[in-house]
Image (cartoon, rainbow, N blue to C red):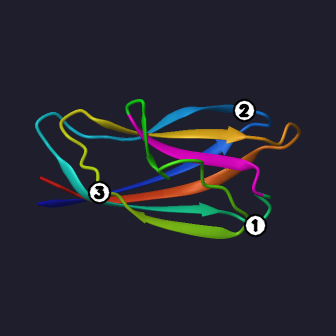
Amino acid sequence: MEKVQVCKIVNASAGASGETILYTESAGRVLKNIKIQLRFPSGASDELRIRFLRGNRQISPESGYYAGDNIEYKMNLSEKLLSEDSLLVKYENTNTTEARKCYIFLEGDRE
């Protein structure tokens, strides 16, 4: 088993929304015991909304979104990423004049 660690900064322009790939598992491999830390820096003002998806299905949070200001969320996902599955980040910046960002750290065990 090998440890996987990924860091991503989501920097959303004013009023922007979209999706970005956080991690895609290699062919023939499985990622399990997935842990995610999501950090919103001071000044984020609850204006950046974050959701995690596997394909089209939202997996964290179960409904709604994460948002915050100077706060960190820690999640343990029950999901496994199978061969060539991707974990996506869906974001929405509700501030129409300023960019907002957050930091995402993923850790898991690859078989």
Q: Is residue 76 left or right of residue 10?
A: left
Tell me the residue at 29%/57% (across/down). 78
Q: Residue 16: which numbered mark, if any?
A: 2
Callouts 2 and 3 close, C-beta under 8 Å:
no
**Percent from the top left, x then y, of residue 90?**
55, 38
Give whichever of discs 1 and 3 has the lower sequence position. 1
Which segment is the magenta one? Answer: 46-54
Q: Is residue 72 left or right of residue 22?
A: right
Callouts 1 and 3 close, C-beta under 8 Å:
no
Q: Could you tell me how far apart the alpha carbons at marks 1 and 3 are, in whole angstroms?
A: 30 Å
Tell me the residue at 25%/40% (across/down). 25
Q: Name the residue tied to disc 1.
A: 42
Secondary structure state at the residue bearing disc 3: loop
Q: Is residue 95 left or right of residue 16?
A: right
Q: Quadrant of residue 103?
A: bottom right
The three-letter amino acid code for the residue at tag 2 is Ala
Q: How crowded is mark 2: few (under 14 residues within 10 Å), some or many (20 or more)?
A: some
Q: Residue 81: which numbered mark, if any?
A: none
Tell me the residue at 68%/39% (across/down). 92
**Percent from the top left, x then y, of residue 51?**
54, 45
Q: Name the residue tied to disc 3.
A: 78
**Percent from the top left, x then y, of residue 63?**
53, 48
The three-letter amino acid code for the residue at tag 1 is Ser
Secondary structure state at the residue bearing disc 1: loop
Q: Residues within 10 Å of mark 1 (few under 14, many from 20)?
A: few
The three-letter amino acid code for the residue at tag 3 is Ser
Instruction: Count the numbered circles shown.
Output: 3
Give whichever of discs 2 and 1 has the lower sequence position. 2
Q: Could you tell me how far apart the alpha carbons at marks 2 and 1 are, in whole angstroms?
A: 20 Å
Give whichever of discs 2 and 3 has the lower sequence position. 2
Secondary structure state at the residue bearing disc 2: loop
- The quarter of the image holding the N terminus is bottom left
